[in-house]
Amino acid sequence: MIIAIIFGCSKENVSTNVPVLGHAATGLYNPQQMFKDNTAEAVEYALSFEALAGIEIDIQLSNNQSFWLYHDDDLESQTSGSGAVGDRSDEYLEGLSYSTLNKERLAALEALQFDNVQGTKIVFLDLKFFLLGQYDNEEKISIANKLKELINEKSKQITFIPIVRSLENFNIFKESGFEKVFADVIDLETAGKRFDEGFDGVFIKDSFVNSEDVAELKTKGEVILFELRTVNSIKKAIQKNPDFLLVHEFRTALAI
Amino acid sequence: MNCLRWILFIVMFLSCYGLSQKTDYDNNHFEIGKSLEITRFDMFHAINGTLNIRNAIKIMPSLGIGIQKTYALKRFHPRFSLGVGLDLFKNKTNFNFGPEIRSAISAYSLNSNQRLTYTEGFFGYFLAYGDKWRLNHQLSLGKGVEKRLNDNVSSLYWGFHIAFGIAYVL
């Protein structure tokens, strides 16, 4: 054991200059997560780490057009409720809790408190409700304006950045006054296209790009690599030198 | 079928194993062993001991190091835990089973200016089988608190302790 301790603690040199973001605050399907992802507890916990650059959270709209943090398409998979967030009222969603030991409540964006934030942070808002394609342009503009108004009332230490998947939505959020709007892309080609359209940054799966690809994309905007679960995958992603890493277990990434 | 074969093999092995080295040890004796401990935030390989008092009360200290944090992350992650159990089969020399309470403390440095400590309390059971050489197992559930020493933030969580080990009666 003594030999193991000695060899176990010789720290190798891996650059840790790449800022780390918490995926869904404390990680999706992460057995080591302290609190359930996308909950008020998870957001507060993650943002209280000074070394963490920020978090990404998943946002859905209730049928009252309020913003709720939730990842999955249906409520059955994670909570005591049923149906989709978009089909449910605020009153119904307020009564739901996750099927975890802590029984965290479903969280509304409006109700999040940012009292224990350490330093300045970035919160990426993955706007999942636009994937449904059920809103016309006028409704989208109204939703974007409402979101901007809501986050303006939140902490000054936090920069909120929406993540969208189309040029149309990008333009709407830019016009609503968001300084930066990022894209979630499925491949390298789409990433290049998004930068040409004016997007400020892209989220791209780590496995889709190598160091050269990241270096080339960084000449056009900010690059965030995601889908990082293991220590090895995080170490390899650091070597690619992106602008941020979006990881499922941020304590592990911060300890590298 | 393959599964049944394995179960039969293990049962046969354990039966022979238990009977092969019949030892009459004192009412008070000590065991020392090695175990793998699985917790919510890391797996530990540990050196553990068991002090048997009147063959009824078991004091089970354990000192381990976290495999993920210490080896993969190169962050030294020690853990000390202490279990106290009551043997419900105290008249049997080669089989022990009973409830246990366990307390554990572990710590590691997240980076140069952030240190995390975990203090945990569990309730569960322990199980041991064998004579001179013994197989051990413990399973317990409970609450823990993560403390960040530099910014004085604490978070409560549900945790668990699962251990599998082998020990030698001294």
Image: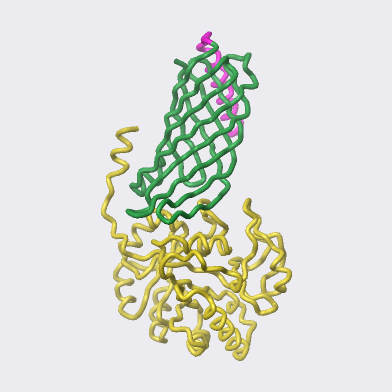
Chain colours: A yellow, B green
Image quadrant containing the C terminus of chain A: bottom left
In the image, the segment drawn in magenta is: B1-26
Viewer-side residue, B66 vs A72: B66
Residue A61 horizontal/vertical position (percent): 63, 76
Location of residue B16 by image quarter: top right
Residue drawn at the location 34% of the way across and 69% of the way down: A242
Residue drawn at the location 54% of the way across and 57% of the way down: A29
Residue A172 horizontal/vertical position (percent): 52, 88
Task: Let me know if residue A206 appears in the view.
Answer: no
- Count the labels in the image: 0
Q: Is residue B22 magenta?
A: yes
Q: Is residue B7 above or below residue B43?
A: above
Residue drawn at the location 32% of the way across and 60% of the way down: A16
Residue drawn at the location 48% of the way across and 36% of the way down: B37
Residue B2 horizontal/vertical position (percent): 58, 34
Task: Let me know if residue A176 appears in the view.
Answer: yes
Q: Is residue A72 left or right of residue A119?
A: right
Q: Is residue A109 left or right of residue A214?
A: right
Q: Is residue B142 magenta?
A: no
Q: Residue furthest top?
A: B24
Location of residue A80 by image quarter: bottom right
